[in-house]
Image: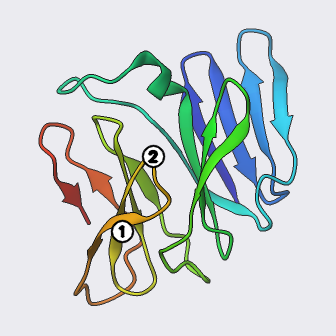
Amino acid sequence: PLEVLTVSDIVLVCGSDWSIQVFDMNKGTVASEVPDAHSRAIHCITQNKGSAFSSQAPDSYNLFLTSAVTDGMKIWDLRTLRCVRRYENHVNRCQPCSSAVSPCGRFIATGSEDNCAYVYDIRSSNYLHRLQNHSDTVLNVAFNPATPQVRL
């Protein structure tokens, strides 16, 4: 599987070789690479896109998330290509659960195989809320761009 995310003139690519590559589209070359970013194939990459309805510190836009089955979710800083924090309280053993960054840049949501969605404070590895009582695995999550709500 190949997950591609475009950010201005760069493209972030994660694939089955467990790496993250940053392509500079102006030069047509690989600008940098993180080998073995996860211990399994990365199935989700999510950029902090922000929203027209809220503002964030400019440095927040340098953050992106990756997820791999059995290896949790990691937040990365594009400037250093280092993992800043890991999030592992949700269950992700076999399904490709997605993640999302809130429009304000303060929260992260992710799906989980325990029929819940988890909301984390971006600055803490512990979850703030566990949204329960779903009938099956929560595969996709998204934040409403205008109001503080999570869509499942």
Residue 61 lies, with reference to residue 147, above or below; the image says above
Q: Residue at x 47, y 75 (%)?
A: 90
Q: Position of residue 82 (x, y in %)?
A: 73, 38
Instruction: State the SS at label 2.
Output: loop
Q: Residue at x 26, y 22 (%)?
A: 55
Identify the colour scheme used: rainbow
Three-letter code for the amino acid on which mark 1 is drawn: Tyr
Instruction: Give the labeled residue for mark 2.
Output: 123
Left or right of 146 in this view: 30: right
Q: Position of residue 67 (x, y in %)?
A: 60, 60
Among numbered discs 1 and 2, the one appearing first in the sequence: 1
Q: Quadrant of the N terminus?
A: bottom right
Q: Nearer the viewer, mark 1 or mark 2?
A: 2
Left or right of 111 in this view: 148: left
* Total numbered circles: 2
Q: Do the CB atoms of the residues marked 1 and 2 lie less than 8 Å apart?
A: no
Q: Position of residue 27 (x, y in %)?
A: 79, 10
Q: Residue at x 83, y 28 (%)?
A: 32
Left or right of 15 in this view: 61: left
Instruction: State the SS at label 1.
Output: strand
Res 118 label? 1
Residue neighbourhood size for the residue with mark 1, other residues' Cα within 10 Å, grouped as few (<14), some (14–19), many (≥20):
many
Q: Residue at x 65, y 22 (%)?
A: 10
Residue 126 lies, with reference to residue 14, above or below; the image says below
Which of the 4 image quadrants contains residue 88? bottom right
Q: Quadrant of the C terminus?
A: bottom left
Three-letter code for the amino acid on which mark 2 is drawn: Arg
